[in-house]
Amino acid sequence: MSSIKQGSNSFSKFVGEFSTILDRIAGFCMFSIMVLVVLNVLFRTIFNSSILGTYEYVGFLTAAVIGLSLANCAYTRSHIAVDYFMVRLPLKTQKVAEILITGIALIFWVLSAWHLGKYAYTLSLRGVVSPTTQTHFYYFIYLVAFGLLALGLVLLANLIEYLKRLVIR
């Protein structure tokens, strides 16, 4: 399956740039996790005390890393793909399969984002907080849902490109 990375239309370029920005934010979150863990270890070793809520913050930031990096991973085709059967199919069948798989994935991830958003809203209404730091974690759920919507944008750009390729060739 081919990538839209070389796509020439402005929507594909916007999606690529947007996913890169989200990926950089995810990288900053990963860096923050590393700093927090190292500081926590140093505090335990030197001062015999730890940073309150390290475990919770690492969990929140990890969710942010995963949610925000998915779009760029899909855009750059950095994920694992098994093409063993696809490459043996006729070219037209491969193109139709790309469209079907991408369309199903688009629907799945957008619906997942929608339901995560509803779940976060429910948690915000109930005032649910984390046990140690009393942090409202619905913010992080919204962040993951936002990342899934960005993944949906990448899939939509892919779908548009695949439909163009099917019609043109």
Image (tube, helix red, strand yellow):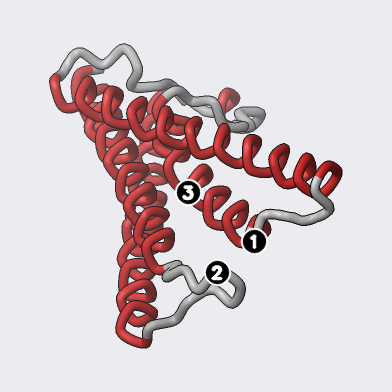
Q: Give neighbour class at mark 2: few <14, some 14-19, many 20+ (Cα, 10 Å).
A: few
Name the residue beneath numbered marker 2: 133
The residues tagged by marks 3 and 2 sit, at their Cα atoms, a distance apart of: 18 Å
Tell me the residue at 36%/25% (across/down): 20
Is 64 on the left-hand or right-hand side of 54? left
Q: Do tag 1 and tag 2 residues touch (Cβ < 8 Å)? A: yes
Location of residue 1 in the rendering, given as x and y in whole percent from the top left corner: 47, 26
- Any mark on residue 64, and which? 3
The residues tagged by marks 1 and 2 sit, at their Cα atoms, a distance apart of: 7 Å
Q: Give neighbour class at mark 3: few <14, some 14-19, many 20+ (Cα, 10 Å).
A: many
Depth order, front residue of 167/99:
99
Amino acid, disc 2? Thr
Amino acid, disc 1? Leu
Quarter of the image that includes the C terminus: top left
Which of label 3 and label 2 is nearer to you? 2
Q: Which of marks 1 and 2 is nearer the N terminus?
A: 1
Amino acid, disc 3? Ala
Location of residue 36 in the rendering, given as x and y in whole percent from the top left corner: 63, 43
Is 15 on the left-hand or right-hand side of 33? left
Location of residue 52 in the rendering, given as x and y in whole percent from the top left corner: 64, 61
Depth order, front residue of 101/69:
69
Q: Earlier in the sequence, mark 3 or mark 1?
A: 1
Q: What element carries label 1?
A: loop
Name the residue beneath numbered marker 1: 52
